[in-house]
Amino acid sequence: MRTRSRGVRIDTWTCGLPFKSEAFAQDTRKNDPRRPLTGYRGHGSSNEGPFMIVSASAIFVSGFVGLLLTLLVETGGVSGSAQDPPTSGNDLVKVRVLSDVVTLLPNQPFTIAVEYTISPDWHIYWRNPGASGAAPVVDVTAPDGFQVGAVQFPRPRIFGAGADTTYGYDGTVLLMVPMTAPPTLPRDEVTITLELEWLVCKQMCLLGESRQTLRFPVAAPGREVTRNQRADRLIQAWQSRVPRSTVGSSAPSRFTAVVNPNDRLFLSGIAGAAKTAVYLPGGSPGVAPKLPGPIQGRILEGNFVFDIPLSVVPEDSLGEPLRANGVILLGTYERPRALQIDVPIPTPVPDEVDSEGSTASES
């Protein structure tokens, strides 16, 4: 079974990236070759959330790298030293895969993770990259019967300002994939393969890719699963940075999220010690804030409050239910409290028509 993360794999005239395009990308490019692709999704059980785009402004890769480097040297953007400039994202980002378990048993829940170590001053992207960029791609290939969850993205940083704002990570970050083994496993071992792609940017952007394999011996019946204690602690630390769900049993107390019939998203809840509250849109197809960039909320008597006007375009929903999707960042990146927002857009109720053909509003 193969499944894809919430990242993108797209192809537009604006960047020349060797992403593998699919029908939507091809049709969009043919019909409107100057339109950056928004809202395109891949396939797979982990592909539950929307994401954004590669924009027309900031990505110059593949055949454009040499020209761009020349321009940067001439303008002082890159030092003309003898050191060779990077030619791919693999030069700038080192990846490794790890798991919180060493062995597997039937029905065993476990987590695999991809650790990205990013060169100084460069960054990769969140599931919604913002004004430009592309989210990392994590393709998981597992034997039949394995359940593969959605990729978990920790709280992102905010880069830039205004119309050029993007969201992502620098330094080191873990992206995590929860999985569950099936009731029946082979006797010897299980192999899981990850196909990875990422875009890393500074003044220029480069694409990196890697194929990684994990092999898990199957524990004998009656034996306990062997855990990787160091990886387990690391994964748990990064899972604590994943935005908390605001629905179901995990919902925080005194939290409100609703979209009114006038397409305004109201959010309120306990801010705690946080002095700031910022809303980042998740990139839901057909739904976007009318306000550009990160949206600053108000802190009133220990509570955060947002009133966000939305642009709702049903024909751009790609057949998906309309939802306001995003995250609220409370406080600083170093104190990583964040909330996941996912609110359905109310469907207009058509006016009732009486026996003489007039609507209720006309009577």
Image: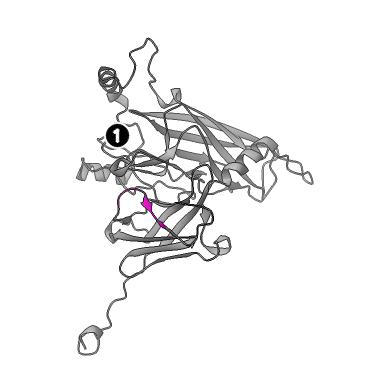
Give the image location of residue 283, x and y in percent: 37, 51
Disc 1 element: loop
Which residue type does callout 1 highlight?
A: Ala
Across and down, in percent, residue 115 comes to 54, 34
- Does residue 29 sit above or below 86 in this rendering? below
Give the residue pinned by disc 1: 58
Q: Between residues 67 and 294, which one lies in front from this camera angle?
A: 294
Q: Is residue 233 left or right of residue 63?
A: right
* Closer to us: 337 or 228: 337
Left or right? Give the position of 323 relative to 178. Answer: left
Residue drawn at x 45%, y 63% is 268
Q: How crowded is the residue under tag 1: few (<14 C-alpha within 10 Å), some, or many (20+)?
A: some
- What residue do we see at 44% from left, 34% from top? 197
Q: Position of residue 188 (x, y in %)?
A: 69, 36
User: Relative to 224, is 51 on the left or the right?
Assistant: left
Q: Which residues are magenta?
A: 292-298
In the image, 262 versus 283, the foreground residue is 262
User: What is the image's colouring?
Assistant: one colour
Residue farthest right in this picture? 222
Position of residue 42 relative to residue 354, above or below, is above
Residue extending furthest front?
A: 301
Q: Residue at x 48, y 62 (%)?
A: 301
